[in-house]
Image (cartoon, rainbow, N blue to C red):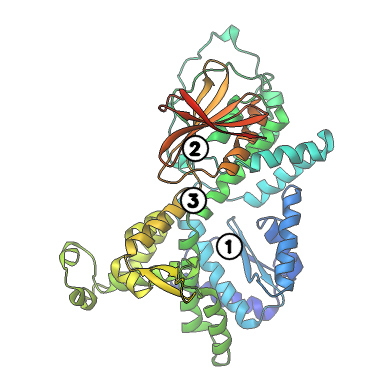
Amino acid sequence: MANLTPELARYRDEARELAAGYGLDFYEVIFELVDYDELNMIAAYGGFPTRYPHWRFGMEYEQLSKSYAYGLSKIYELVINNDPCYAYLMRSNSLTDQKLVMAHVYGHCDFFKNNMWFAKTPRKMMDIMANHGTAIRRYMDRFGQSTVEDFIDQVNSIDNLIDIYSPFIQREPKPPSRPLIEEDEQPPRAHRIPASEYMDRYINPRSRVDQAATVRPPVRQSSEPTRDVLKFLLEKAPLDTWQQDVMAMLRDEAYYFAPQGMTKIMNEGWAVFWHSRIMTHHMLDASEVVNYADAHAGTLFTQPGQINPYKMGVELFRHIEHRWDRGQFGIEYQRCDDARLRREWNTEAGRGKEKVFEVRRIYNDVSFIDEFVTPEFAEDQKLYVYGVDQATGQLEIVDRDYTKVKKGLLDALTNFGNPIIRVADDNYRNRGELYLRHEWVARDLEFEAALRTLRSLYAMWKRPVHIETREGGHPRLLSFDGTDAVMKEVSSSTGNDVEVVGSDAS
């Protein structure tokens, strides 16, 4: 249960009532007071103190602790998408900070519950993470900590090779109503015990349900390229049962965290939008104005040439509310090409609140930026292309074309800025080799990063792996056979070699 002081509990109740009064809808929120080192530890685990043990969490804790000790950063709050939501408050924060954070948290919790991109995330992730931690600790006890950690490292290095849209799209045909083989040819399968989704893996383990789980299925060419590389490996790579289980757990976690990456600007902007309104209209005492302004300004501070998701998000929500309150939308407004008339346009439509709640429900960062970053917004927020003057060393505006800034934002936000890679063939040249294809969009792969990915894939596939890409617009094929990495020029997407243009030993 929460360990808030009576004073903080009173302000929590006030913030909850005010948020609900504005129309926010959220799960129950459990606030916990923790010291700075406890908060750093929880943050290092991604908000889940019961996660599996791994060396990278220790490294992240050290980084957070030193950053806090040197005054470089400070965590004000941490909130978890769960039902109930868990939120952690730093004990050393001032009362003003705690009130601000609680109002901020209710904005996040409303977003978690109502934004459609979170609709497929499990709402009992705190329990699921604890189960994952328990299972992985058992595997470490059985197979050795270093063995399991090494495999986790391999999976973590490719955990961005998932299809972030797959929870909402049925990409594969439904299974046939009749079995593909006769009943007497099917391998014996144990009866499945009814269980909830997140407990099924433990109640019906693969070793019990399917004795052939560790046997690699026959190699065959994929019918169509698949973007969910982790799922492909889970189904077809020659993995041991415990490796399949660990990969399945880490894949589930990757899909849980994906919507947070897809909505970072919106989520933070929505929370700032409501904490600023609740604080300035209701909860802020006159004696706290300076402290609040200092904390709020620090959150929104943005250097020229950089993007602060808090600032970008809240200003876009305010811009949308302002436009829809004044009726600055529709065909007539879009046809108006007079800048002065557009700025003064006001039909008193009063639909701002309705619109921001609609946007909160159905958009992600890419669609949010694409639709609502207008020329007027770009001008107000000074979204220009900046560069350094070689003569003076000062930052200056290089280009005022906001579409270039917008395109750069969309490029960085699409697939979190990661390259889109698909499995195209799992029997390349009839040798059982893995062939992937990079969707090249005027940005080359980073060779070292691509090579690390191929090494991890080779460790799981146990046969040579290849990735088709482009370099400067020219077709290239990067291959790794377990020893050497070779870059070849290819004539087309078929992977036909033309010449070797580069080689790098692993």
Contact between labelled residues 3 and 2, with CB atoms less than 8 Å apart: no
Q: Amino acid at mark 2?
A: Ile
Separation of marks 2 and 3 at Cα, in angstroms: 12 Å
Examine the rendered structure and indicate whether residue 362 appears above or below residue 505.
below
Mark 3 residue crowding within 10 angstroms, few (<14) / some (14–19) / many (20+):
few
Q: Identify the residue at image location x=71%, y=24%.
A: 208
Compare marks 3 and 1 and give the one earlier in the sequence: 1
Residue 247 visible (yes or no): yes
User: Amino acid under label 3?
Assistant: Gly
Q: Is residue 216 above or below residue 371?
A: above
Q: Residues within 10 Å of mark 1 (few under 14, many from 20)?
A: some
Tag of residue 28: 1
Residue at image x 76%, y 48%? 53
Q: Circle 3 sits in a helix, a strand or a loop, which is it?
A: helix
Q: Which residue is mark 3?
A: 417
Residue closer to the observer: 354 or 312 = 312
> Which residue lies most toward the front here?
391
Q: Pointer 2: what residue? A: 421
Left or right of residue 263, residue 215 in this image: right
Quadrant where the C terminus is found in the figure: top right
Give x and y (percent) for residue 225: 45, 29
Given the image, on which type of amino acid does mark 1 rest? Glu
Q: Quadrant of the N terminus?
A: bottom right
Q: CA distance from mark 2 to mark 1?
A: 39 Å
Identity of the residue drawn at 58% across and 35% down: 230
Percent coordinates x, y for residue 310 in the rendering = 49, 68
Helix, strand or loop at label 2? It is strand
Residue 364 visible, this orientation: no
